Image (cartoon, rainbow, N blue to C red):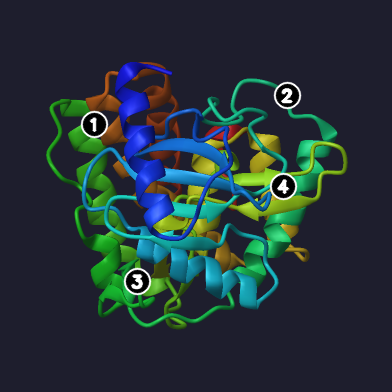
Amino acid sequence: MTAERGAVAAQLTHRLTSAGIPLDQTGLTPLSQGADNLVFAARTIDGRALVVKTPLRQPARYGTAAWAGRALAREQIPAPQVLWCDEAACVETLCPGVPLTGSADRLDTSGDTPHPLVIRAVEGAGALLRRAHDIAVRGFGKLNALGVGQAGSLAESLLHGVGRASRSEETSGLASAARRLLADNLWRLRDRGPRLLLGDCAARHIFADPATGTVTGFIDLESARGGDPHADVAGFSVREHPQVAQALLDGYFPDGPSVDQSWALTLHRARISSFLLQFHTHRDEHDVAQRIADILSADLKAITTETPTPLPDAFT
């Protein structure tokens, strides 16, 4: 552990003890750093395995994660339970198993042919995700600690920020086209009221038992949102290997998606791809940006020609 992380760990240990969560003599052990948090493993004196987080930037949304975890638990959907949090730290139960990417430092499942157990786990995750999406929330967009979203309508939440300027002319052009086509086709989306979304639905945020493929938890719930359930499914397919994306669809739509559902998936993919393209371009992650640009270009063509697809047409 670096000296800097050691100092953070010491401060967190003191705060946890003050909050009535004393740790065993091992203390805090660093885990792979996430995009938003420094993350540590810990164990209480009575043997409970924990994850301890502190944000890399403010504001943290640990209260949102606590609310979403409780909401999922009430429906018997596995997720970490927040034991204590404030603006600067969060303590939650550890989900057993491993992420569906195979390791915590791998961002997605693209590239390698997935193992059959991963496919089985993703199908199970799709079925669980469909149940999670039955949970109603108040308002669209980012949820606060009471499960209330910031936007009053689906349209307001979807168009916010889409098509912002980028330093890349090609990226700006694709993003602007995505905003225009999304605005022109919002009428195709069926607003059935805001439902609980994971918000950052990705294989690295789904844990499973590596021996059985049983899903053991949806993690990183700070990104939970209120919205159209198709957005979670669409976001997953942008990031993951085509076979993994298909497995989630198979679990989520046991009878296959309808035409209306294919429209929703295509429109949400275009919106999410627009954000991700600008994000990865800004970070000079050119390979990932190119893959997303291909997906976005294919979806914009599908929208223009009125031929929506459940999965990105760029996969075929």
Instruction: State whether residue 162 is above or below residue 39.
Output: below
Give the class, few, some or many, for how many residues have Cα within 10 Å of label 3's Cα (few <14, many ≥20): some
**Is there a contact, CB below 8 Å, between mark 2 and mark 3?**
no
Looking at the image, tell me whether mark 2 or mark 1 is earlier in sequence order: 2
Query: Which SS class for mark 2?
Result: loop
Closer to the chain start, of discs 4 and 1, is: 4
Q: Position of residue 10 (x, y in %)?
A: 36, 34
Query: Which labelled disc corresponds to residue 113?
Result: 2
Q: Nearer the viewer, mark 2 or mark 3?
A: 3
Q: On the image, numbered disc 3 is attached to which residue?
A: 145
Dot 2 crowding, Cα within 10 Å, few <14, some 14–19, many 20+: few
Q: Which of the two marks, 1 or 3, is nearer to us in this view?
A: 3
Q: Nearer the viewer, mark 2 or mark 4?
A: 4
Front: mark 3 or 4: 3
Q: Residue at 73% of width from left, 24% of height from top?
A: 113
State the CA–CA distance, disc 3 to disc 4: 28 Å
| Location of mark 1 (residue) | 171
Eye-nearest disc, 2 or 1? 2
Disc nearer the start of the sequence (1/3): 3
Along the polypeptide, which appears first: circle 3 or circle 4? Answer: 4
> Relative to the observer, which residue lies in front, 64 or 160?
64
Tag 3: amino acid: Ala
Side (left or right) of 17 relative to 157 = right
- The kind of residue on which mark 4 rests is Val
Q: Earlier in the sequence, mark 2 or mark 4?
A: 2
Neighbor class of circle 1 (other Cα within 10 Å; few <14, some 14-19, many 20+) is many
Q: Nearer the viewer, residue 258 or 111?
A: 111
Q: Residue at x 62, y 27 (%)?
A: 103
Figure check: 9 above or below 106: below
Q: Amino acid at mark 1?
A: Thr
